[in-house]
């Protein structure tokens, strides 16, 4: 699995360099524009979307078929991608927090607290993590072309649920207290973690059954 | 050591190898005890199949020209005079067979062929 | 280990195509050339051997082990090259070395880089900028650099120029200097197979038509050029294929020497390509008759 991960990281090296440059520009821009939150989210999203790039490179090169002729199992192949997802998730969050921190230190924001901004960032990151939990089995099963269409669908569904939830709370007259928000984020994260393992198992099953 | 393979001669390649190695043994280019190249090396260099060289060596061994020691390789055997003569006889017979075949094809009589043979012998 | 690959009764159904009871054995220490038209079932067979597809019947043994490609320790000994390079575009040779080092227990960087130097592969460029020939050479270098015992190639030399193809064939000849090393390669370029193979495996429409030593095939088969009447005098068991045109009939015969001894017919040597064309054509004609 280590070899496969090195392959993905080498593959993303070029675009990774670009990401760092983009991030630096975004930080400067956000301080200038007084809107660090939007850009920290953009950074998270950008990092997570590298997952698409990595999978697309493999698909273009037909690498997985070749990998299956190496001393590598279907499980290795899948596990690598889930580890990569976690790495990108972590890197995105780290970069996002860094950006927010820098913005706050630079005194760009007054209307929103650091905790609030951080919570929003976490929710976004977990949102994307969940999106990829749904997407990875689709990518393994149907390929990148279909997965792209699926991505749109997933976001429609997720935003539907979110706005539905918000409306429901309004109708029921529930106030969004800090505790409730934290509890929701916690539940959200727990769901994402559970989904991660479920998704992994499904993907292993798919790749095991796959014909190359 | 030179071995020249022709693809257009119509003779199987293993036969070309055996006859050339036999020739070298008989004219003394290869001396008793001399090592022969390994089958795989010969196959690689001549760009032919290992099966071909293997067959050639087996033939040479059967005819008593070489001996193969497992793990060491193949070597030229002590020449057996009786054998050498027999080989030469075989060669003569082969050429004569070709002459007879050619004669048959153009409808030549036995006597006529013998006459030509006699004539050629005298000319030498 | 007597055989590197043993395939027995291999069957795989696809819509419109069936790989039908394919059986053959690849002796260790030999080069087996696998020929057939496009779509004859070469790739399907190779995929089944490598456990890349599920089969509908039959058995595959790799390096003596049943369904060997399912076991990483067997795959350690196998080098596989497909018709194109499957390394992602953004990698460099040094990356490939790093990756493979963590995948193969026996990966030998020195061997790998010596092949790369020999093939004159640029170590600064990314693979995207490699020519097709360079990509194939990289794949072959990678396939040979982990103390490989069995090399499996699917159309690996197709689409390369003759100079590069010959260079690659020489590499195979070197590889086979070790008696434990085996090469199984498919190609529709019969001239390459004729040059390199010890055994010929011919497949057509999912069925094995021929599995024979190359020398036997080339020495014993011949093409008789004659009139249709003369063709009728040939023994049925002799005929491996017939091709007719307006002015002559060509018959692929299994024992050219015997026909030559008759003395009344012209017999030419048969190249592997002739054997492929005649056998495949003959099968088609038999198909019509049915």
Image (cartoon, rainbow, N blue to C red):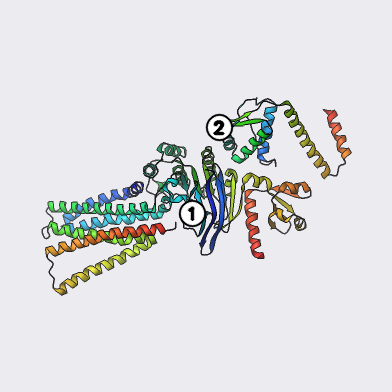
Measuring 21% from the left and 62% from the top, which residue is drawn there?
A188
* Side of A29 where C21 appears, left or right: right
Residue B92 in the image: x percent, y percent? 77, 33
Which residue carries the number 2 mark? B71
Discs 1, 2: same chain: no
Residue C35 in the image: x percent, y percent? 57, 51
Residue A165 in the image: x percent, y percent? 20, 70
Q: Cβ–Cβ below 8 Å for labels 1 and 2?
A: no
Q: Which quadrant of the rendered structure holds the C terminus of chain C?
A: bottom right
* Side of A190 where C208 appears, left or right: right
State which mark lies toward you, 1 or 2: 2
Residue B118 in the image: x percent, y percent? 86, 32
- Based on the displayed image, in which of its 4 quarters is residue C173 positioned? top right
Asked if residue C207 shows in the view, the reply is yes
Which residue carries the number 1 mark? C47
The secondary structure type at the circle numbered 1 is: helix
Decide: few, some or many residues near mark 2? Use Cα within 10 Å; few <14, some 14-19, many ≥20.
Answer: few
């Amino acid at each position: 699995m280590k070899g496969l991960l090195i392959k993905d990281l080498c593959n993303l090296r070029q675009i990774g360099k670009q990401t760092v440059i983009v991030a630096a520009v975004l930080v400067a821009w956000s301080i200038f524009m007084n809107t660090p939150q939007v850009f920290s989210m953009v950074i998270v999203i950008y990092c997570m979307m590298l997952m698409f790039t990595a999978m697309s490179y493999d698909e273009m090169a037909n690498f997985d078929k070749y990998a299956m002729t190496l001393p590598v199992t279907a499980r290795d192949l899948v596990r690598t991608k889930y580890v990569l997802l976690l790495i990108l998730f972590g890197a995105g969050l780290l970069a996002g927090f860094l950006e927010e921190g820098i913005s706050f230190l630079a005194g760009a924001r007054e209307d929103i607290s650091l905790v609030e901004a951080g919570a929003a960032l976490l929710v976004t990151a977990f949102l994307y993590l969940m999106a990829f939990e749904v997407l990875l089995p689709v990518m393994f099963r149907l390929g990148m072309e279909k997965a792209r269409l699926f991505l749109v669908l997933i976001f429609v569904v997720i935003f539907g649920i979110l706005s539905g939830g918000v409306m429901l709370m309004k109708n029921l007259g529930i106030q969004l207290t800090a505790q409730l928000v934290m509890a929701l984020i916690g539940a959200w994260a727990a769901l994402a973690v559970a989904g991660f393992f479920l998704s992994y198992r499904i993907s292993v099953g798919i790749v095991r059954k796959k014909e190359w | 050591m030179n071995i020249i393979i022709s693809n257009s001669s119509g003779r199987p390649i293993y036969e070309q190898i055996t006859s050339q190695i036999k020739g070298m043994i008989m004219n003394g280019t290869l001396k008793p005890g001399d090592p022969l190249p390994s089958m795989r090396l010969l196959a690689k260099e001549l760009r032919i199949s290992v099966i071909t060289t293997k067959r050639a060596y087996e033939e040479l061994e059967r005819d008593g020209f070489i001996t193969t020691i497992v793990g060491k390789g193949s070597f030229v055997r002590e020449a057996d005079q009786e054998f050498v003569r027999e080989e030469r006889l075989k060669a003569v017979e082969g050429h004569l067979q070709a002459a007879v075949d050619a004669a048959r094809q153009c409808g030549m009589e036995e006597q006529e062929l013998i006459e030509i043979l006699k004539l050629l012998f005298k000319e030498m | 280990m007597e055989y590197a690959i043993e395939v027995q009764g291999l069957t795989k159904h696809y819509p419109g195509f069936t790989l039908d009871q394919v059986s053959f054995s690849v002796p260790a220490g030999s080069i087996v050339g696998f020929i057939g038209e496009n779509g004859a079932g070469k790739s399907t067979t190779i995929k089944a051997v490598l456990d890349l597809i599920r089969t509908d019947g039959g058995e595959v043994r790799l390096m003596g082990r049943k369904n060997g490609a399912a076991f990483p320790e067997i795959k350690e000994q196998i080098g596989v090259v497909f018709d194109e390079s499957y390394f992602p575009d953004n990698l460099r040779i040094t990356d490939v070395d790093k990756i493979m080092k963590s995948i193969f227990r026996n990966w030998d960087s020195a061997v790998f880089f010596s092949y790369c130097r020999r093939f004159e592969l640029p170590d600064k460029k990314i693979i995207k900028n490699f020519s097709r020939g360079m990509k194939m050479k990289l794949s072959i270098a990678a396939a040979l650099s982990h103390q490989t015992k069995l090399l499996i190639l699917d159309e690996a030399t197709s689409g390369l120029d003759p100079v590069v193809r010959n260079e690659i064939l020489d590499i195979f000849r070197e590889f086979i200097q070790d008696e434990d090393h085996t090469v199984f390669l498919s190609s529709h370029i019969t001239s390459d197979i004729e040059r390199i193979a010890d055994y010929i495996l011919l497949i057509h429409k999912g069925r094995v038509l021929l599995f024979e030593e190359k020398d036997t095939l080339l020495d014993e088969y011949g093409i008789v050029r004659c009139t249709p009447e003369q063709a009728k005098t040939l023994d049925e068991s002799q005929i491996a294929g017939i091709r007719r045109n307006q002015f002559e009939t060509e018959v692929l015969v299994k024992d050219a020497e015997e026909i030559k001894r008759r003395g009344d017919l012209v017999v030419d040597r048969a190249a592997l390509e002739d054997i492929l064309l005649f056998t495949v054509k003959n099968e088609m004609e038999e198909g019509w008759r049915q």
